[in-house]
Amino acid sequence: SRIEVPEEIKGCLPHAWQGKKKSLLVIYADFLCSEDCLEPEDHCTVTGEQRGKPLFELLDELEIPGYHVHVVKSRQMGPGVGGYRATELKRLKDSILSKGTGKWIIGTACRCHGVLSAMELEPR
């Protein structure tokens, strides 16, 4: 079942705020990004500033006691539209099957934007 994302996560992430349906939205930018950003590896196209670790890596490295974490890497499919490869979903499925029941933080993120949700899988 879906549960709240733990509040303590906000403190270790850039610009995080509560989304709908118990999700947490995360973004590196403190401004509205262009829908057709090419998402270069090393810098922000608006500010020109160097970008650190991609958000998908930062989120995937979260260590929250009592939670398993899995982040699906997303890619821009077109202006304002993100998506991911089926292999990413298979990795998620394999991760859940190998670690099993318990609390999970599952997210999707590109280099700069992400969404996290939490759920609890109970034994059958």
Image (cartoon, grey):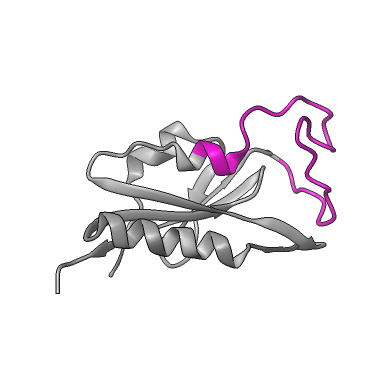
Instruction: Give the residue drawn at x 14%, y 74%.
Output: 124
Q: Is residue 4 magenta?
A: no
Front-most of residues 101 and 21: 101
> Which region is colored magenta?
31-58
| Residue at image point 83% right, 48% down | 38
Query: Is residue 44 one of those drawn in magenta?
Result: yes
x, y percent for residue 99: 27, 54
Rendering quarter of residue 101: bottom left
Q: Which quarter of the figure has residue 96?
A: bottom left
Q: Position of residue 77 (x, y in %)?
A: 77, 63
Residue farthest to the bottom, as pictured: 124
Q: Residue furthest left?
A: 124
Q: Main secondary structure of the magenta part?
A: loop
Residue 6 place in picture, x, y as percent: 32, 47
- The image quadrant where one finds the N terminus is bottom left
Query: Where's residue 34, x and y in %?
Result: 82, 51
Along the line of sight, the residue nearer the viewer: 80 or 98: 98
